Structure formats: C-alpha cells, structure tokens
Image: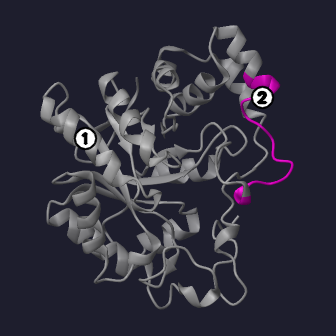
Amino acid sequence: MKKLKFRNGDTMDAIGLGTWKSEKGEVTKAVKTALNNGYKHIDCAATYGNEAEVGEAFSEIFNKGKVKREDVWITSKLWNNAHKQEDVIPALKQTLKDLQLDYLDLYLIHWPVAFKPDIGFPEKAEDFLSLEEVPLIETWNEMVKAKEQGLVKHIGVSNFSIEKLKDLMAETDQIPEMNQVELHPYLQQNKLLEFCSKNGINVTAYSPLGSGDRPDEMKAADEPSLLENPVINKVAKKHGASPGQILIKWSEQRGTAVIPKSTNEDRIKQNLMSAGYQLDEDDMKEIADLDYHFRYVNGKFFEMEGNSYENIYND
C-alpha cells in the first residue's frame, strides 16, 4: 500500500477506515475489525457523534497490545461551532477524551464555515458566524498552538477550495499539511490536486464510493451511481475486483489517501485489499473521462437566506 509522507517524515497509510454515518452500535465493532485486520489509519470527527464508541475500540485494542497506538494514524476534525479562539483547544480535548487518546496524529478544520458555539447544526442564518466575525486564521492559530502543545502531531483542513487555501496561506507560515475533500471519478479535482501537490499539502479523498448511505435530504433525485457505472464495472471485471475496490484503488493510485466507510466485516477487509490491484494506463484514461464535476456533498445545507456561505467551494 502507498503511504503519504508528511514534512517531518511521518507517514500515513493511504487506505483508512472512515467512520462518518457509522451507527454507535456498529462503529466500535467496525473499528476493532479494521485494526485487527491490518488497518493503520482511522478517520474520525466530532460531528459524527460516535467518537466515544470509537474510543472504546481504541482502548480495547491498544490495551491488548497486539496493535500499538503509535502504529495507528488517527485523524479527527474540529466542528464548525468551535472556531472561536477560546473554543478550539477545549473541543480538541473533548475529542481526545472521547477517543481515549493522549494525542491525535492529524486534526483538521472540518469546514471553512463557523457556527455560534451553542449550535450543533444551523436552522437559520442567525445560527452562523461570518468569517469576518471569526476569521479562519483565528481558528488556524489555535490549531498551531495545539500542535505546539503536543495534543496533535499534524494539522490541516477539510473542504477547502484553492481560494480558501490561498487566503489562509497568505496569513501564516504554518501551511496546512492535509486537505480532506470529496474526491472520486465524478469529481476528480485535478486543479486542486495540482495546487496541493505544488504546496506540499497532502490530500485525502472522502465519499470515494459515492456516499450512497448518506441522509436522503442530502441526495439529489437523479444523482448518478459510481458503483453502477459501466466503465467502473468493466474495469472491475477485467481485474477480478469489485467496483468498490476499483474506486478505492483509483484514489490510492493517484497519490491521495482514501477513507471508505463500512461497518460490514467482509467489506472492511475487501476495502483494504484494494491496495493489491494495479490499474493500467488504459484504465486510468477511461476513468479520467468520467469527470462530471458532480458533488454528492454539495455544501448547499450551509446556504440560508441572510448568511454569507453561498457556494463555499468557489467553483
């Protein structure tokens, strides 16, 4: 399996287990299954609402000693209601408590969007804080402090466009080490990948299989299916792989990390086995032609009359 290298020489396995949408009753088992079957990369977030259950898995596995904490890369993310200077590190410490960890390998600003501190998810424009009220650099400077305090080893962002990255980088010499974004053959993000590569920013692909199990209110009525795409299925048949394995391998082979979510034991194992395949030049060319610039997670849920978050991706 490929590994992504960070500026200090640390490495992260390209294929990890995502935990978004994993139910509390299932996620502990899923994380234990993953760690017991060779995963060394687990992706979490406070807003997923299941970090305490993920922490139960970490505690049990690490205490047994078969898998060491220092051998597993663990990522989490700062939610939008903790962007203010005084809220960042307390939110991180709550995540560490829930995950039963002393430190994170990577901590990300989840979105370039800010809510008021008591808002889990906004229902009206007044629930938001503008980026004038809470500039991203204010939040970022606290992320830097968290790194200096040893609470996290690396810091980065998620869902940041080139424009948002440039804005942040203009105000700090601590350039983000990661940008986690939606990435799959229907949304290949070539310009963003090129920009990140030139600036030493690693990239993680989320929703690599099309996020078919996300809430209905986030879905379009006629959205295309990645897993049913004829080209993906043709390539899968050619290699004796599943469509999901081809989608995971495509991300890994492009040099990004990729975090497919599953709570199914067999699928968790199969997803990691994606690393064993190799797509040839013809495969990659055919898949390159599938770029429709289609987003499954389009950010429209942040757009409300009266706030300033229209088209956060700056497309």
Q: Residues within 10 Å of mark 1 (few under 14, many from 20)?
A: many
Residue, disc 2: 228
The residue under label 2 is which amino acid type? Answer: Glu
Residue, disc 1: 58
Q: Quadrant of the C terminus?
A: bottom right
Q: Which of 128 and 262 is in front in this view?
A: 262
Q: How crowded is mark 2: few (under 14 residues within 10 Å), some or many (20 or more)?
A: few
Q: Is residue 299 above or below residue 287?
A: below
In the rendered structure, does residue 160 fall within the stretch colored magenta? no
Rendered image quadrant of residue 199: bottom left
Q: Which of 65 and 12 is in front in this view?
A: 65
The residue stretch that appears in magenta? 217-232
Which tag, 2 or 1, sits closer to the chain's start?
1
| Horizontal side, residue 182 vs residue 286: left or right | left
Q: In this view, does 265 lie above or below 157?
A: above
Is residue 171 among the parts visible in the rendering? no
Camera-near label (2 vs 1) is 1
Q: Position of residue 81 (x, y in %)?
A: 44, 77
Q: Disc 2 on helix, strand or loop?
A: loop
